[in-house]
Image: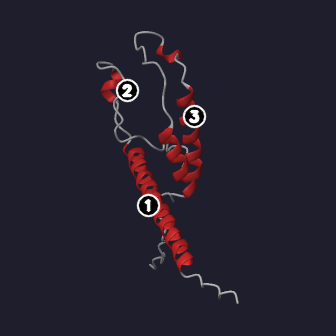
Amino acid sequence: MTGTRRTPIGRHPGPKITPAAIRLFEAMRRVRCTCAPIDWNGKYWERQQCQGCKRWWSLHSDLCDALGSKPWEWPRVEDPDAQNPYPPGCNAHLTWEPNRRAQAMWLALATASREARREALRARKAAEQNTDLDRTNKPTPPPAS
């Protein structure tokens, strides 16, 4: 019996973090929630999201598109410092677990964002140095006779 020869395809192991994804992530980090605390004893399911939360989820959707996320990769990012949002004692509180994949993506985006800022700073400093060199290396015009 002859076996098949398969050539492995060298695929990138994860999503490519683009400059657009970094910009969206940075915008998400600047959004602030102004929602009132959840009243778990009341009709919490009728609670309205604040403008900040609506904006955050809109940016999250755009980020999913920028990363080429699959529909089941939701949420795509989660703050690694996220705490259990449910009240102690309820079933949701007992079964809640952090989304490790989403937290890993948060950390990857945070690292990429930090590196992009450093690179921009290096480029700005290099441009300033080139401008300073151009000023000092300009030839002096000959004296008027």
In the rendered structure, are the residues bearing label 3 and label 1 in contact, judged by CB atoms less than 8 Å apart? no
What is the C-alpha distance between the residues marked 2 and 1?
35 Å
Against 135, is 115 above or below?
above
- Mark 2, other Cα within 10 Å: few <14 / some 14–19 / many ≥20: few
User: Pointer 3: what residue?
Assistant: 55
Q: What numbered label is drawn on residue 91?
A: none
- Mark 3, other Cα within 10 Å: few <14 / some 14–19 / many ≥20: some
Asked whether 92 or 77 is in front, the reply is: 77
Sequence order check: which comes first, mark 3 or mark 2? 3
Q: Position of residue 15 (x, y in %)?
A: 50, 57
User: Pointer 1: what residue?
Assistant: 118
Which residue is rendered at x = 55% and y = 72% of the image?
131
- Mark 1, other Cα within 10 Å: few <14 / some 14–19 / many ≥20: few
Amino acid type, callout 2: Pro
Which residue is rendered at x = 56% and y = 77% of the image?
134
Sequence order check: which comes first, mark 2 or mark 1? 2
Q: Position of residue 9 (x, y in %)?
A: 50, 71
The quadrant where residue 103 appears: top left
Amino acid type, callout 3: Arg
Against 43, is 50 above or below?
below
In the image, 89: left or right of 65? left
Residue extending farthest to the top is 42
User: Pointer 2: what residue?
Assistant: 85
Disc 1 is placed on an element classified as helix
